[in-house]
Amino acid sequence: MKLSRFVIVKLTFFLILGICLGYFLNITLLWSIVTCLLLLCILFLILVLNTNRFQPPLSFGIVAFVLMISIGILSVNIHNQKLQKRHYSHFKLPVESVTFKIKSVLKSNTYYDKYVIDILKVNTKNVTGTSLLNIKKDTLSASYKIDDVFLTTDVFQDILPPLNPNQFNYKQYLERQYIYNQITTSKEHLLQLPKSKPSILGIAYATNRAISSKLKTYPFGSDELAILNALLLGQRQDISETLYTNYTKAGVIHILAVSGLHVGILLLILNYILTPFECIKHGKIIKTGCIIILMWCFALLTGLSPSVSRATLMFTLVAISLNSNRPSNIFNTVAISAFLLLLCKPMLLFDVGFQLSYTAVLSIITFQPKLNALWFPKTKLSKIFWNTLTVTTAAQIGVLPLSIYYFHQFPGLFFLSNLIIVPLLGYILGLGILIIALASVQLLPNALVYIFNETIAFMNGFISWIASQQHFIFDAISIKLNTLLAIYAVMLNLIYVYTNPKFKSISIALFTCIGLQITLIYNDVSLYNSEWVLFHKNRQTLLTYKDAITLNIYNSDSSNTSKSYPLKDYIISKDIKNQTNESLKSVYNIHHKTLLIVDSLGVYNVNTFKPYFVLLSNSPKVNLNRLIDSLSPKEIIADGSNYKSYIKRWEATCKHKKIPFYQTGKKGAYIFKE
């Protein structure tokens, strides 16, 4: 069957196109509303004029798809909280107090407990909007819960963009969740207020935490309990760094995040267990209803995280499709779930988890039947392993380009680790649900705890062995966005050739292959540009010069920083093959302009040249007024190696002298332009 014949697939494609246009082009809300209304009128007019025709004309389809693009644009605007009149960002008076409710609990870092909050009031005015909350860690106080309401006198702060090139843009990531500001406070500055009625998320979180507390009373090992919390309660914060790294290297990190894989396995288990219902009247309806209720109970158990909620919605539709008496197509089912999710939350399109989940599912339903037909095993055990291998391989075919694009690595032994872990996961999920049910009523026998501990210990040991095979882990791989899109274009066209082997399809596939080659050549050529960058790093001066695929690193100390922040991601992104490390010198010639570095010694008496840039490094005790008068530089730069009090004083001096002052701690790395 051809995908193009399914209307919902087409509608979802054009909705995605509209969301992309709405996000990147910033089309106004008024224009998107007017366009949608106009297209609706045209569509209605076409229907009225063609009521007697058996099939609608071509113009109807064209207008419908353009309307769907407009709906995508409108969806982006409607969900943009900043466009709402009551959003807190429109509050003009000085902020004296903020009242908020905790919406979700995030993973803490070394210094702060982190939450997403709904803003209820600014001063005494009712407002809307979400923000990030950072609370300084206090070991004596318990963490707060969803639906807790507080008042604070600390005000909103901007979320800073990344200070160095090619770093993860946390500001952009939060903006796609409509979080534009943050509040940083301490528990002493929070006044807890009475709660409103509990939300569904609050009930889910309270249930999750209550079960977790009861599990701690049983003799689970620390790693085993952490895995149980991750697999069934969606809580990964207790997993050790070593264990998490091992799962990443083995290519099975996806099993630690409750998502489509877990819900899919649960659907298969429930579909098998509840098969006897089909023997009674209306049994399929009862069976489907029970499956849906139990899947959403599982989602509630895990805290209704976004990844679990969207996976449960998708497999709810799959469950209906599997147990309906009418023929259906899995592509339509997946497209409907994506359509509904994107209509309600258009920014999900840019979520990595959303992209990986749907790419994996589409890849499985496309490639797995073809791979499965290559061999027909005789025994039941061999069938299980063959099906697992084909499903895993099919999923990897689809997600591999995305994984490399986002994570820059590929575990070569993924097929071996998944061959063992995925079948084992079904057993672990079933056993884990039984353990949670018994622990909730305090009837869990220690024998079950022992069995679970041994099972998880075996799985962790196997994962550790896979992760130790360093020769099969391919990391530091980088591809650009244009290459990613070209790869998927080639894959789609190869599928088209396989299903429709004609001259036209083969010609299109060849053109997409040529397009991929052009993008690779273009990206390779662009990498050969030279570039000088002064990175921002605390207590250190870090200057680099990239010449083609070689990076020369000039460091204020003797440490090798190429495998750590901030150079690691830069080296991967720029496809650096060679690196050199040298001590920092006092003078550099950058694009025919002289850079003078004044370090802690404060020496700058030079008579042979006039520097264009002066870099202040390691808090030199200099009179900046005198330095400017003596050297007449065009720009003063201060990096992260300096004391903040010094930087503040230098900035004031430069402002008085009317000379540009660049601070890497505020503006990010300094990239020297030609």
Image (cartoon, helix red, strand yellow):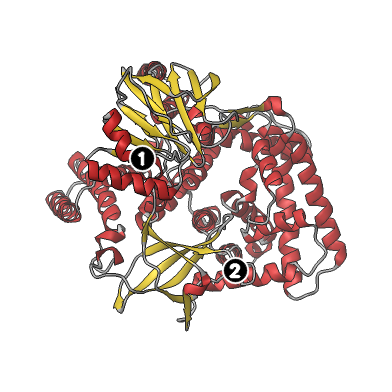
Toward the viewer: 126 or 232?
126
Q: What's under tag 1, amino acid-wise?
A: Asn
Toward the viewer: 398 or 401?
401
Residue at position x 50%, y 53% in the image = 314
Describe the element under mark 1 as helix, strand or loop: loop
**Image height check: is 194 above or below 310?**
below
Crowd rating for badge 2 (residues with CA inside 10 Å; few <14, some 14–19, many 20+):
few
- Relative side of 24 to 480, left or right: left
**Image height check: is 580 above or below 322?**
above
Residue extending farthest to the right is 447
Crowd rating for badge 1 (residues with CA inside 10 Å; few <14, some 14–19, many 20+):
few
- Relative side of 325 to 83, left or right: right
The answer to whether the residues at label 2 and label 1 have Cβ atoms under 8 Å apart is no
Residue at position x 36%, y 63% in the image = 156
Q: Is residue 2 visible?
A: yes
Toward the viewer: 290 or 349?
349
Q: Position of residue 489 (x, y in %)?
A: 40, 28
Which label was assigned to residue 184?
A: none
Q: Where is residue 375 in the image (x, y as percent from the top left)?
A: 68, 28
**Image height check: is 447 above or below 462?**
below
Q: Residue tagged by mark 1?
A: 623
Asked which quadrant contains residue 450, the reply is bottom right
Q: Where is residue 363 in the image (x, y as percent from the top left)?
A: 52, 37
Label 2, label 1: how many angstroms apart (C-alpha)? 91 Å
Which quadrant would the C terminus be assigned to in this image? top left
Residue extending farthest to the bottom is 194
Q: Position of residue 15 (x, y in %)?
A: 32, 47
Q: Can residue 166 be seen in this view?
A: no
Q: Residue tagged by mark 2?
A: 281
Which quadrant would the N terminus be assigned to in this image? top left
